[in-house]
Image (cartoon, rainbow, N blue to C red):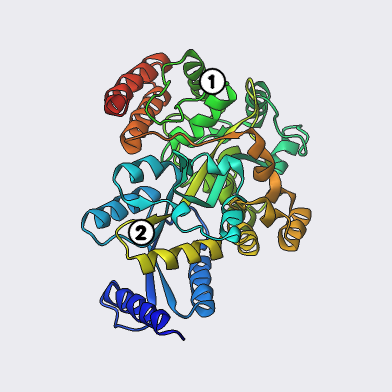
Amino acid sequence: MHRKSFNRLIAATALAAASLPFGASAQAQTEISFFYPVAVGGAITATIDGLAADFTKENPSIKVTPIYAGSYQDTIVKALTAHKAGTPPVTSVLLSTDMFTLIDEDAIIPFDDFAKTADDKKWMGGFYKAFMLNSQTGGKTWGIPFQRSTIVLYYNKEAFKAAGLDPNKPPQTWAEMADYAKKLTVKDGSGKVTQYGIQIPSSGFPYWLFQALAIQNDVVMANDAGNAVKFDDPKVIEALQYWVDLAKQGVHPPGIVEWGTTPKDFFEKKVAMMWTTTGNLTNVRNNAKFDFGVAMLPAGKRRGSPTGGGNFYIFKKSTPAQQEAAFKFVKWITHPERAARWSMETGYVATSEAAYLTDTLRKYGRDFPPAVVARDQLPHALSEFSTHDNQRVTKALNDGLQAALTGTKTPAQAMQDAQREADRLLRGYK
């Protein structure tokens, strides 16, 4: 080895050892602390632990330490708190919609800085365009799609048969969904509903579920620059009215519907159709004791779903050696074969066409057709709602949606109030 190369290696090793977090002993190993949000059912942590161990086995000079940080909301709070304290994770999976917030906080660095080879650039260009909409801004790539999703419709085929509906023909339009929901709603002798026709959760991520309705009604709620919203657009109000009316008609549970228990309600046959993330697919496959179907969301004026889920980000205050190691890990874990394995084990959409061309995912899609529904919906998908000061702007929208769903405000009043608050929050970003 040349003396210069040797000196560089010694310097890099010393830098990595000096920056090892959590009191690790000095050794020729760069440690990557990796914040991961556990927000969806299933044994995802075992899969992440396995992937981290496999990577370290293949790359002995790098140790990946996953830290399970709670929900997405918990994880960004912890990551930004650590960033401000000067001890951020090296990398983290955070919502794709957190991109503007992370840039505004000067917490992350673009991946373009690390993509030096033709192979690196080919890898970065290989992700589905729908997923890159929430990963790029200002000509730079700030996030790499990892556990990405769309919303899909899950339905109980046995309930369809019992209601005289064709179990292989899910609803294609809003009108059909409302009609099917009516036929699928079951009451006991006292008139109490024992099975609702449709359930769209309104806790946790109400803005995300609602955004699908807005897209289907042919309206985009935020501009690309993330500094203006259209909550009070008549089309947005009309979409909210449709959701409110499902509950008024008695085919959808009243009030706030819990995100976390919606799959359980489906398993327990309390609901015949539900909207939730494709990231719940493996959970549903493992726990539904009946034949179920998965379909694209029904169309209003058009088909549509927002994309969703998490991206990898690299944090600015980690060392250059850690950042390079994190880039290597992110590239490794999103490799087509591993993306295929991740999709099969979790239900998330594999993030590149190359993953769907692997023998692994081709066979899985043939054997289990629901696995490709979310991918097939991508041409109809738009970016997930995201703005500057995203947490607070989204809260204004969520509060408005919940006010309308609980009946404390009309859809028009709720969205006008949300618009006023969002305008106030975004004024400084114009």
Residue 76 visible? The answer is: yes
| Image point (45%, 39%), residue name | 137
Res 250 quadrant in image? top right
Camera-side mark, 2 or 1? 2
- Above or below, comparing residue 55 to residue 133 in the picture: below
| Image point (31%, 19%), residue name | 420
Residue 68: x, y in percent? 38, 62
| Front-lying residue, 193 or 286 | 286
Residue 312 visible? The answer is: no
Q: Which three-letter amino acid code belongs to the residue tagged 2?
A: Ala
| Image point (40%, 31%), residue name | 226
| Front-lying residue, 336 or 167 | 336
Is residue 19 toward the left or the right of residue 196 in the image?
Answer: left
Residue topped by disc 1: 242
Residue topped by disc 2: 69
| Front-lying residue, 403 or 20 | 20
Is residue 405 toward the left or the right of residue 162 in the image?
Answer: left
Residue 411: x, y in percent? 42, 17
Q: Which three-letter amino acid code belongs to the residue tagged 1?
A: Tyr
Res 366 quadrant in image? bottom right
Q: Mark 2 or 1 closer to N-term?
A: 2
